[in-house]
Amino acid sequence: MSDFSEELVRSKTEDEQEESCMFSGTGMSFPWLQKHIETVATGGKKEKDFAQTTSACLSFIQEALLKHQWQQAAEYMHSYFQILEDSDSYKRQAAPEISLQHALYLLHHGMFEDANRNLSHAETWRYGEKSASQEVLINLIQAYKGLLQYYTWSKNKMELSRLDKEDYAYNTAFQNMLNHSGKMSVNLCTLIQTPGVWDPFVKSYVEMLEFYGDRDEAREVLTNYAYDEKFPSNPNAHIYLYNFLKREKAPREKLISVLKILYQIVPSHKLMLEFHRLLRKSDKEDHRKLALEVLFGVLDFAGCTKNITAWKYLAKYLRQTLMENHLAWVQEEWNSRKNWWPGFHFSFFWAKTNWKEDKALACEKALVAGILLGKGCRYFRYISKQDDQVIKKKIKRIKKSVKKYSIANPGL
Amino acid sequence: MPMPFRARGLPPGHGHRASCSPLSPLLPGPLQPPPAKGLYYRRARQVGALDASPAADLKKEILVNVGGRRYVLPWSTLDDFPLSRLSKLRLCRNHEEISQLCDDYDEDNQEFFFDRSPSAFGMIVSFLAAGRLALLRGTCVLSFREELAYWGIEEAHLEKCCLRELLRKLEELAELRQQETLHLRQEARRPSGDPSRWGVFMHWLRETVENPHSGLPGKVFACLSILFVATTAVSLCVSTMPDLRAEEDKNGVPRLATGLLWEPETPGPLPLLPPGPDPWDPGVTAQDLLFRGGFSFRRKPQAVLDVTEQLSRFLWDHGDIAFAPLGKLMLENFKLEGAGSRSKKKTVVSVKRLLQDLGGHQPWGCPWAFLSFRQRRFSILGGPVLGKSVASLLGELLHEELAMRWEQLLLDDAFTGGALAWVPGKTPQVGQLVYPAGGALDKLYFQEVNLTPDGDPQALGDPGHIQLRGPVRQVVTCTVQGESLLAVRSDYHCALWKVSKQGHPAPLQVLQVGKGASGISLSPHLPGELAVCSRSGAVCLWTPQDGLQQVYKDPETLVFWDPSPWRWADFTAHPRVLTVGDRTGVKMIDTKGPPGCGLLLFRGGAEASCQKGERVLLTQYLGKCGPEPLLPTVHLICTQFSLYLVDERLPLVPMLKWDHGLPSAPLWAQLQPPPRPGHPQPLLLGGQGGHLQLLHLAGEGASVPRLAGPPQSLPSSSDSLSAFPLLEPRSQWRLQERLKAPTIGLAATIPSSASEPVLSLFQLSAAGDVFYQRLRLQAEPRHHSRAPTASWTPQATACCSRWLKTLLEVPPTPPVWAAPTFSNRCLLTQVEPSKVEQKVPEGLRAAMAEGRLLQQRDLGSLPSVEPPPAPEPGPENELSARLEAAWEGQVAAWWEKQQGRSSGPRKPPKRHKRRTQLSNTFSSLSGRLDLSDATSPPHSPDRTSSEARPQPLVTPPSQELTQELWAQGVPSERQQTLRDYMAKLPVQGDAPGEVSSSLSQTATPSWQQTLQGGATQLPPRRNPPRGAALPSSQTSSFQATPSRQQTPVLSGSQRHRKKPRMGF
């Protein structure tokens, strides 16, 4: 049997790598290349050796799965598993990955204990030289174990909250929890040090640290997760840090500096409105300017065009800014947008649609359009011409504001 | 066994004898009672690998090496299995046949090598020896069956008990697995405890696992491999069984929606429109391009371009192009220099005779083609000269072309994005299909289609069309703020139309792309905005307000070096940020920001755990679909192996990776809006080979996309072969080819209707056919595990029959000439000689009776054939003029004219023969020399008479010519000839001031030609130019420079030019 499997591996590696690179010259590999060569080699006849039959078997499985023919797929699978049963070195090295995937499946279906057992097996699996990729995988397996421990821990925590402090059971439960948390921190720590996106692990680790009052450690973990250069840029890291600092009641300056980075990464995030509020309240001039920039930034994005809060903030803040005689700020923002915002936000189509769908939104937008584009703008004209009893007063107020603050023709 | 040996097939050197005689079946072996012990050993035995030459009598026995294990089998053993592969070896007569049967053959040891499983062969050997075919423990059924087929042994030989055992084992295992899962499930139910708390935790954990953004690391998603899909699916197949499902539902754990299925209404797509009038030719295949044959190829097949074969085919098919100009330059006789030892008689070849011998055209592969001794001598003598120039020039070009074709065959990225689009109309049921058709795909058709909720889509009326100037590669449509826009990409042009509500296109803009456009996309945010990327690496944004502006330019690839010039651009959630993709990665660029900066969105490499050689084939922004996209920040990236979903807020780490396993390049993707609110969105992925896959994408707003159900593969057009009536083989083959034509476009739509949603899917094939299929959403979980199989309705088969009838009315492309395989003798006797015998049929009969080729002399005077059209005239110089004249077959007249001009009234010298030396040709090619007749007097009227006889050369002294210049690169043995030739040239002139450069710097010489040719039009061919018809030749000079870049054209040089045949 081992002969078979080695054949399988050899043919796979040789055929795919050497050939594809050899003649195409581009270094690109083509999964369908083998088929072309086969038709040439056999002149259309089907002639398969062992390695090809196994790969054919695999493709049968795949096909059956994709056509939702489960029964047939299972039959093929049995044939295929027989080949894998006493597999060679190549397959054995892949065993932890398979275990991990199986464990994930079990988790998905709520079978925690099985998953835990599976992960323990995978963790202790050793075969051959430990490669770098395998190391990450082992870390991941440990981290998932840690996650499961977190699950038990937080179940304990919940029980604990129901128990009386004087109760005898309280102590044992507490001990139990400590036990789990110790194991958990060991399991999670190594993974969190490795660069990557580890949101759930970091989140649960920080929750545990916070529970035991280890705020410094928690802050360090989060700061490291957010600011370490080696980690991929991850908006969630900054969100976690911001939420942590907010819970800690950190000074506003600190919060602003965290959100500034988030603003650089995801200017369309919903925290940006909170950021705007923070900046608006700030005394610093440049923060106030940034507050305007943030609002414009949010509304640049296609997903945020109907965000009524953002439009409300913008209308209000534009008025405020112009009242404070910071026309230059507005113009700076507007200049880069004036050739596409009219078509993007203030087109006739949107005027009609917005009015039909959401009158409040239409009013806010009309005010902004009036300020930025002047009275002649189609959006403003359409909304102001509407004859609606309920918001008649509002429209009148808008018209007044536009007349007063419009930047379109400052001379008039 | 005492049997007579008889030499069979193999050549004597091989010494293989077989014990098979005509008598052998009559002399049954087992009649002789052999000793019980060692009987089977005699019938087959294994020998050690170290035995270099095993003690085997190779005349009686065969030595085979299967996967490293060597066996010696007497030939007699194989007598009982005449159909087996080993027995067939005996019948082999030569190496070629042996190599058909085995992987290698060692002549020294007379050992046959087979690259097969040794253990399986062990079982087969024991069967051959002992007659019992039993399975060893731990053998895979499937592979063993294959092995049996390979060795040519029937399955029926398998022992009954073994067969039964196997079947039983299979069933047992299936049962066992079922029970196991059942057990696991029951265990899992136990710790459920308090349902509310359970629910809270379950919810949280499920969120973490399912939601990579707030939850599962991208790395794990990146680990999703086929194995995972397989493992999951096996469990899924169990979980769909009715009894288990009931329990699971009680469990309260929401599952992956296994019942989620878009069920095809027919087993395959159906043709929507009648086939076009143009026949379709599949073009080159791998068989045409790749080298095949040879031992090494069979052992390890590789793709090697077969340039030799193609070159020889080219020389046969287009010999006129390859040889004619050069050959005609040589005129009637020529001497082949450099063969000093040979006598004159042997080196001077008469072309006239040679042409007689050829007697016209001898097609490729003709069994009666023959070579005369003259031809043979010519090919031997002229080989080094002709072969070199042809092979070096043509071979290189041909190799380049073949390499390009091969790359195109592997991946044709011209149609990335797809050339089929659905433009919605006034009502959701009616819309327009926009697609290119016609043989060259240069007509853009607008076909109105009505999608009835229950019936098949109907084409309404005849399609309107727009004729374009190039093949359409991509058709994109987008509806922004109520405006439908249509963009079309051709190779070098892009065009934009606005489609009115009535469906009439109004052109907005045409853009020209110098280096060739590789992709276009329409902005989903602002009406009329268009991103175009060119093969030079530039990305341009066209907006109605600002026009065209280049927003990005980088000829290099993003992540690592890759030779492909393919580029792609698309939009993002921010209307002023674009993605730019190439084969190595995808980058986001801000069009407002400074040039060159940007953020990598996807990198082909470790972050996405890409395979070696994995390249990006398609990137697409998924926020396009619908006015309010559910996934506003997600981009789809397809490689030849996998599909990635990347969120632009979290670049470089894919949210989802899935091995699509498509056997062809995935170049089309279509995300459709959810059929019902809250339902997963169908994402269609189409491969070039017509393969289609459907994924169910769930996740909206801030949450991340995930697969909501098991992916589906949809039927492709080759699956609908069964709907067509049976045909005779030739038409059947034609139909198959047509259905197998590569797909070049994909469009889909879900018309919103009150009843259950139906997905209409259209596919455009390279043959210009539009196929459709309808998929019905099966949202209810099914209780049976087998997918229901759709069957053909009578309407469908009727539709196919109609289509087929139209298809077969189109005349097929004429087949390529092939060598005849019939005998002409019966034809000869059958045909009665008619009374009125003409010369042609007579000659034909005579040739047939003799069994030789029909030659021109048999037919007498035939109407002369048109020579192939002359190539477009290049820059003007003497060489090209001369080559052109040679092409037209009038080099003699040209030469005379040339001489007449240069020599004027001078006396012709006596040396007549030297004029037509082959070396003349080469000296004029290799040396840099100036021919000038500036000093020559105006030509005299006696030139008209001189053209009748060969115009002799004059021999003025040409000492001004520096030898260094022309002697470079001329072989030493030819230099004497060259010198002689030079001696005959007229005195060098300076050609002062006559160069009219205004006419010479021409990108389109053919145009120049007509402008001038109007006045100096020559008489038609075969009328040699008269002196009277040549105006202004006196006033001009003539200069010939072999360097092509700066070739001054003189007005006078037009006079001997023929009317150009190409380029008008």
Image: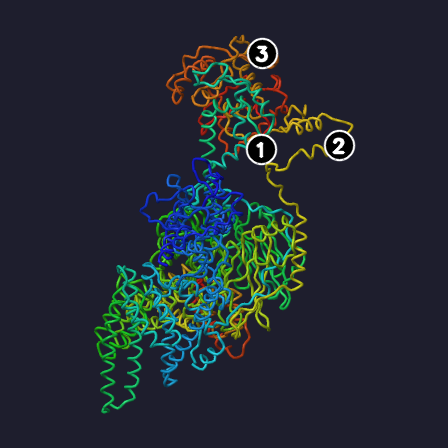
- In screen coordinates, is B271 left or right of A156? right
Which labelled disc corresponds to residue B641?
none
* Label 3 residue SS: loop
Task: Decide which of B1019, B889 is in the foreground and name it.
Answer: B889
Same-chain status of marks 2 and 1:
yes
Residue B767 position, x and y percent, is 58, 50
Same-chain status of marks 2 and 3:
yes
Label 2 sits on residue: B832
Residue B881 position, x and y percent, is 53, 24
Which labelled disc corresponds to residue B367?
1
- What separation in Å lies between label 2 and label 1 (alpha carbons)? 26 Å
- What separation in Å lies between label 2 and label 3 (alpha carbons)? 62 Å
Residue B471 position, x and y percent, is 55, 47
* Label 1 residue SS: loop
* Label 2 residue SS: loop
Which three-letter amino acid code belongs to the residue tagged 1?
A: Pro
Q: Chain of mark 2?
A: B
Instruction: Name the N-terminal-most of marks 2 and 3.
Output: 2
